[in-house]
Image (spheres, rainbow, N blue to C red):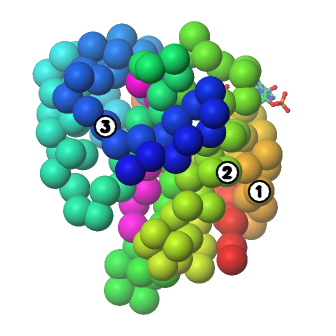
Amino acid sequence: MLIDLGDLQIRSWRKADLAALVRHANNPKIAANLRDQFPHPYSRRDGIEYLSFVRDQRPERNFALQYDNEAIGGLGFQLGIDISRVTAEMGYWVSESFWGRGFASRAARALSEWAFDEYKLTRVFALVFSHNLASVRVLEKAGFQCEGLMRRSAIKNGVVLDQLLYAKLI
Ligand SMILES: CC(C)(COP(=O)(O)OP(=O)(O)OC[C@H]1O[C@@H](n2cnc3c(N)ncnc32)[C@H](O)[C@@H]1OP(=O)(O)O)[C@@H](O)C(=O)NCCC(=O)NCCS
């Protein structure tokens, strides 16, 4: 898979991404805003297991964000099942070294648009901790609309949190 955005690419993960993946993912500020399945510290063993997992997925659901020939982040989907099979949840992260350059917004817009046709969806949604203002901004810039506040719907690092529900439709 390849979505070419000029200076940025969204593409399939490769085994050769291991060192870059571990270097960029091993950051508590990133893990703090993601699900617990994204570990911290992020070890070489975590990277090996993740790359093996995503490379076996069919359909492919997790992708690397590439800049200057290096994987500097990731984006992916959880596909809905049964009556929710026309929906998918999208998640993403970008290495702190590249924050504030518009990369996540551009990638989230392009990948969400790609997903509608690829997975035959009517809706792509994202859940974001209500304090994660950078990610809220990413979703707004990527064409998502806020549908509501899911109060006390998550627990992260022992703290119960509210999540905002954002969605994009076709
Ligand atoms: C959220 C994240 C993906 C943003 O990546 P990014 O490439 O820096 O995002 P962009 O540059 O496209 O956009 C960030 C926007 O948030 C804004 N922003 C950043 N920090 C902010 C803050 N504390 N308050 C308000 N806005 C903020 C930026 O100004 C920018 O908006 P602008 O273009 O209107 O100025 C990145 O910070 C990250 O990986 N965080 C950890 C993981 C995570 O939160 N993932 C999303 C889970 S829902």
Q: Is mark 2 within 8 Å of ligand 1?
A: no
Q: Is residue 86 magenta?
A: no
Q: Is label 1 or label 3 in front?
A: 3
Tell me where residue 53 sits by quadrant: top left
Residue 85: in sight, yes or no? yes
Front residue of this view, candidates 82 and 62: 62
Above or below residue 2? Residue 70 is above
Mark 2 sits on what residue? 109
- Residue 136: % across, % down: 73, 43
Q: Residue at x 23, y 62 (%)?
A: 58
Q: Left or right: 29 with respect to 77?
A: right
Q: Left or right: 125 with respect to 49?
A: right
Tag on residue 13? Answer: 3
Q: Residue at x 29, y 64 (%)?
A: 59
Q: CA distance from mark 3 to mark 2?
A: 19 Å
Along the polypeptide, which appears first: circle 2 or circle 1? 2
Callout 2: few (<14), some (14-19), or many (20+) C-alpha neighbours within 10 Å?
Answer: some
- Residue 69: % across, % down: 44, 20
Q: Residue at x 31, y 37 (%)?
A: 13
Q: Tell me which image quadrant ligand 1 sits in.
A: top right
Q: Which residues are magenta?
A: 71-79
Q: CA distance from mark 1 to mark 3?
A: 25 Å
